[in-house]
Amino acid sequence: MTSVELLIWVRGPGLQLSLAAFILGMTYRILQTYFLGRAKNLAEPRGSEWVHGIKTIWWRSFFHPGMTVRGYFTIISGYMFHLGFIVTLLFFDQHIELFKSWTGLSWPALPPIVITVTAVLGIAALVAVLVDRFADPVRYLLSDYQDYLCWTLTVLPLVTGLLLAYKIWLPYTSLLTVHIISFELLLVAIPFTKLSHVFTIFIARWYNGAIAGYRGVQS
Amino acid sequence: MVKPASLAEHLECHQVSRRGFLKFCALTTSMMALSPSMMPAVARALEKARRPSVIWLSFQECTGCTESLTRSHSPTIENLILNYLSLDYHHTLQAASGDAAERAREAAMSENYGQYILAVDGSIPVKDGGVYSTIAGVSNLEMLQHTVAGAAAVVAIGSCAAFGGLPHAHPNPTGAVPVQELVHDKPVVNVSGCPPIPVVISGVLAHYLTFGRIPDLDSYGRPLSFFGASIHDRCYRRPYYNKGLFAETFDDEGAKNGWCLFKLGCKGPTTYNACATAKWNQGTSFPIQSGHGCIGCSEPHFWDAGGFYQPLSAGIGSVGTLAGMAVVAGAAAGTAAGRLHQAKRKQAQRQHEKVTVADLEETDS
């Protein structure tokens, strides 16, 4: 298989199959979680589950002082990575073209230099948390292969994307192929690893908020 | 009339000035990515070059390659180079037809056996014994195998000959293959493009005349001097790409301002050719300069590489059906797993045996 044939495959069947695996896996995980069900609460409700659930989904995305009791490192690196990754993924011109080809929807892009900054910040944060994972004995002991697999699958699209944007090391065709493959691997891995939190975090937040709402307390 | 023996004499016959000849040598030296100091050597070699025989076979093709070659530079020195070559067989250009044409080919082959250059444009159908394209009752496959036996080198001209081109596109009903899949014992140079740039064809021939060997090639068998850089790398619109300034439609402000055509499907980043430097129509322009994205015609499988107007970053083909099937399959599997879990939980509840204080007291005693 030549490099051109490989690129055609990853842009065609490869992308379709990985997207299908992602959709299948996420649908499976979400429904499986839904059917776990909840024990019936016999107590009289003191507030709305839904309102508090939705509010919690929204408000838990933002910083609040109670989050810093264990220091600032996790908070800063966490925000840096997540914002860097999400902005790079959703606001780069060429990524928007991909989403447009899938959904027909498009939105304004950020200038490439801004995307470069967000990607570099994302990579820097990932490197920092990896170093911290090795440096902190407790965190190191708690880590298993899946943590390192998820880290690798997350950092690869950012690194290959930067190499592609500035055409470093390999020809454009090869870099584009490697970048798309790295994205496809991430897509396939998300539903079946800890990375599934891209969706399940909203279920978990809603659940926490809903419990608090039912009891009439702040979540 | 005595035919001129060397290029110098031939040019003299056609009243080409010394200045014109040297300008061509400088251009050829530059296009072949040779050092400027090589220009006198190129000039000396071309002056003394003998007239090699060229047999041009046209198979499954549209004649666009010949049209490109003959029209775009006439009557410049590139054509004179081709006149200088002894083009002994070419369907479109030769006066003879029928048996006379085929006899000319046989004669050229026997007179120059082992020394002639074989130029091929068009792909070769091999399915069902190659019956889908024949010349004078002979299949393209047979004619190629017969003619290539005495060739010194083969130049596959155009993307059909180099990579299969349009006839090779899915589902490839004639089993079309490129020259390089059939010829393994002769040097093959792929001059891809749909059509190829005339100066690239003449440059490859000039290189052969100058050095007596084929030029250095890339991994696809194309001359590195012409196919070493991508269109994107040499594109004058590249600064707009770097700034993220793209035309969204063919008539918006971006298009009028000459912004990058990436979003309109330009395949310049993955296409290797000399269009952005050599240009077309005597160096007038090239597709991107005239407002249309590169379609990647000098790359293998360019017909099967997605829509011409789809950006490179977009996927190839529709995902709707597969995505729908994935949702259904995921929902079925998720529901089944959830229900199974519920059933297990109920069974566990049913089988749960309550322990009373009396039971515990019995155990203690």
Image (cartoon, coloured by chain):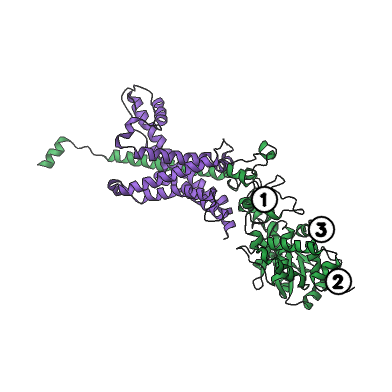
Chain colours: A purple, B green
> A217 above or below A29?
above
> A9 above or below A72?
below
Q: Dot 3: few (<14), some (14–19), or many (≥20) neighbours within 10 Å?
A: few
Disc 1 and disc 2 in contact, CB within 8 angstroms? no
Asked if residue B324 can be seen in this view, the reply is no
Q: Do labels 3 and 2 share a chain?
A: yes
Mark 3 highlights which residue?
B74
Look at the numbered disc 1 and give the secondary structure of its residue.
loop
Question: As shown in the figure, which amino acid type bears the numbered disc 3?
Answer: Ser
Q: Dot 1: few (<14), some (14–19), or many (≥20) neighbours within 10 Å?
A: many
Q: Earlier in the sequence, mark 3 or mark 2?
A: 3
Q: Mark 1 lies on which chain?
A: B
Q: Earlier in the sequence, mark 3 or mark 1?
A: 3
Disc 3 and disc 2 in contact, CB within 8 angstroms? no
The quadrant in which the N terminus of chain A is found is bottom right
Q: Distance between the residues labelled 1 and 2?
A: 40 Å
Q: How far apart are marks 3 and 1 (CA)?
A: 26 Å
Foreground residue among A52 and B245: B245
Q: Mark 3 lies on which chain?
A: B
Q: Which residue is drawn at 82% across and 59% down?
A: B75
Mark 2 highlights which residue?
B100
Mark 1 highlights which residue?
B295
The answer to whether residue A2 is left or right of residue B291 is left
Question: As shown in the figure, which amino acid type bears the numbered disc 1?
Answer: Ile
Look at the numbered disc 3 and give the secondary structure of its residue.
loop
Q: Earlier in the sequence, mark 1 or mark 2?
A: 2
**Residue A69 image point, x, y percent:** 30, 34
**Residue B250 image point, x, y percent:** 69, 40
Look at the numbered disc 2 and give the secondary structure of its residue.
helix
Q: Residue at x 48, y 42 (%)?
A: A117
**Residue B191 image point, x, y percent:** 69, 62
